[in-house]
Amino acid sequence: MSTTAVITEPVKAMDNVRMCLDGKDPKFGDFRDDLARDGFAVVKGAIPSDRARRYADEMYSWLEGFNLGFDRNDLSTAHKDRLPLINEKGMCLHYGVAHEKFVWDVRSEPGVVETFEKVYNDQDLIVSFDAINFGFPNRTDLPPNKPWPHQDQDPEKPGFRCLQGLVNLLPNGPEDGGLIVCRGAHLLSEEFHRGMAWEERIPAWTPEWYGFTENGMKWLADRGCEWVKVCAEPGDLLLWDSRTPHYNLSPKGTIPRFCIYTCYMPVADATQDDLVRKKEAFENRLGTTHWPNAKHTGSNVAKRDGKECPYNRFKPVQEPVLSERAFRLTGIPYLKSQA
Ligand SMILES: [Fe+2]
């Protein structure tokens, strides 16, 4: 009698491989498999939940600190007259907020940075200085937040170029607004743009944004693509390929939706000119959108009804305190002129 030993080993996370998101990535045995297949993934507990809740508290305190009457315990005070400028999509872009200490603390969280290190198989990363998001339920003082399905990447530059991320800071269930993604459509992007090249594009302020029209949505539906609301707990990190069609919805229940966008790329993918621009953005406490290579730099001048917001400020309330690891994420140590 012969016996055959069947050895089953647990799937080990594969290391030393940079993800390509081209449908040919190897199996990794972790969140990277979801990302490769679906174009998005949730990394559970990238930040411990107690710390995530503390960051949410700091976000509330930052809003209350404008002294305009917003009170976290009375959400009827979530009104534009009592808040800094926050658009209907929940984005807060000005006031130096991209460099507040709590925002940098989230960007520097080891579980967040290490996730991107795994994706790129690279520890030499730079991070975006992006907006933060305050979504309050039942706001009637803002235009409705209609779905705006889009890709954050120029169709004329195909392939995987940017991995976007956000750290979710409050419980975020099906009714609590947040990220909606079109599962798996990142891998159809090139085919989509070949097939839809005839269609006039929705005007956008940057070629790195592509909006889906009704025809585009039908194209996706005809191929069985499904739109998914991503649910998350405090401290979860949501990732998506910039080619994955996505948008956000406002919360409908009783809980606000707070998140901080965190997007990293290898510094090797940025030019020295990019890093110079990025250094200036850092030193002037400006935002860079989600592009870590500072493709676009913003302004701290919020405008309300065409007039400068009287509460504009050009520095964070609490300046960031960066560890050596976090400072590398500014890209400054990689500037040749600094050597
Ligand atoms: Fe986007």
Image: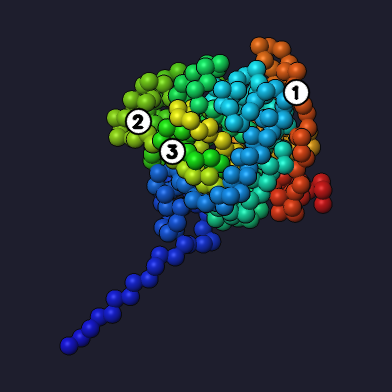
Q: Which mark is residue 173?
A: 3
Precedes in sequence: disc 3 or disc 2: 3
Q: Residue at x 40, y 65 (%)?
A: 11
Q: Is residue 332 above or below residue 211?
A: below
Query: Quick one: which residue is furthest to the bottom in this view?
Result: 1
Question: Quarter of the image containing the N terminus?
Answer: bottom left
Q: Secondary structure at mark 1?
A: loop
Q: Which mark is residue 248?
A: none
Query: What residue type is disc 3 on?
Result: Gly
Q: Quadrant of residue 306?
A: top right
Disc 3 versus disc 1: distance between alpha carbons? 33 Å
Q: Secondary structure at mark 2?
A: helix
Residue to which mark 2 is pinned = 220
| Viewer-side label of 3, 1 | 3
Question: How far across and down, in percent of the image, does residue 160 sit?
Answer: 50, 42
Precedes in sequence: disc 3 or disc 1: 3
Q: Are marks 3 and 1 in contact (CB under 8 Å)?
A: no
Residue to which mark 1 is pinned = 312
Disc 3 versus disc 2: distance between alpha carbons? 25 Å
Q: Classify residue 321 as left or right of residue 13.
A: right
Precedes in sequence: disc 1 or disc 2: 2
Query: What residue type is disc 2 on?
Result: Leu
